[in-house]
Image (cartoon, rainbow, N blue to C red):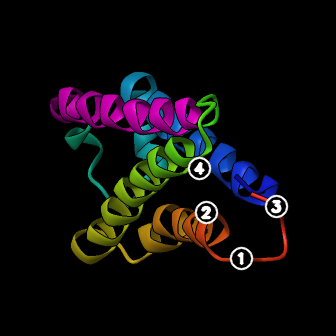
Amino acid sequence: MPKLAKIMIVIVAILHLYIAWFGIFAWQGQGPTTFPDLPADLFPPTTTMAANQGIYNLCLAAGLIWSLFIRNSEWQRKTATAFLLFVAVAGILGAWRVSPDIALVQAGPAVIGLLLLWLPLGTRR
């Protein structure tokens, strides 16, 4: 796997670890500040939903991190591809249904990771 692809996978994994932490642990505390357009009274009743989304993001991060430790290069690439596609699709759907910013923050890095993983950029695989 190209080094730039690995770096991008780490970046996407760190992003999803942060999103997981936010959803699981910081939703009620930092949510109203982070999302000022939402009514503050919305956060307490949606804590369980945010934690569930946090677990989903934790699983994405875990899969991306796992892909970096697979020794077989073919399966490493396939596993990384699958998890980057999961992130990209979730980001595209989030952009369509929630906010266009999600495409830039979530789908963008995943698509860059996929391009670095699959396009021959003069690096050894």
Q: Name the residue rendered at 55%, 66% in the picture.
A: 114
Instruction: Tell me: residue 33, above or below residue 66.
Output: below
Q: Which of the two labelled residues, at mark 3 and mark 2, occupies the earlier sequence position? A: 2
Q: Amino acid at mark 2?
A: Gly
Secondary structure of the residue carrying tag 4 is helix
Q: Amino acid at mark 3?
A: Arg
Q: Residues within 10 Å of mark 4 (few under 14, many from 20)?
A: many
Residue carrying label 2: 113
Gap in Å between the C-alphas at discs 1 and 3? 9 Å
Q: Amino acid at mark 1?
A: Pro
Residue carrying label 3: 124
Q: Name the residue rendered at 48%, 40% in the picture.
A: 19
Residue carrying label 4: 12
Q: Name the residue rendered at 54%, 48% in the picture.
A: 74
Gap in Å between the C-alphas at discs 4 and 3? 22 Å
Circle 4 or circle 3, nearest the eye: 3
Q: Which of the two labelled residues, at mark 4 and mark 3, occupies the earlier sequence position? A: 4
Gap in Å between the C-alphas at discs 1 and 4? 21 Å
Gap in Å between the C-alphas at discs 3 and 2? 16 Å
Residue carrying label 1: 120
Q: Name the residue rendered at 46%, 51% in the picture.
A: 78
Q: Which of the two labelled residues, at mark 1 and mark 4, occupies the earlier sequence position? A: 4
Q: Foreground residue, 84 or 75?
A: 75
Looking at the rendering, the stretch of residues picked out in magenta corresponds to 44-67
Q: In x, y percent, where is residue 11?
A: 67, 48
Q: In x, y percent, where is residue 27?
A: 38, 32
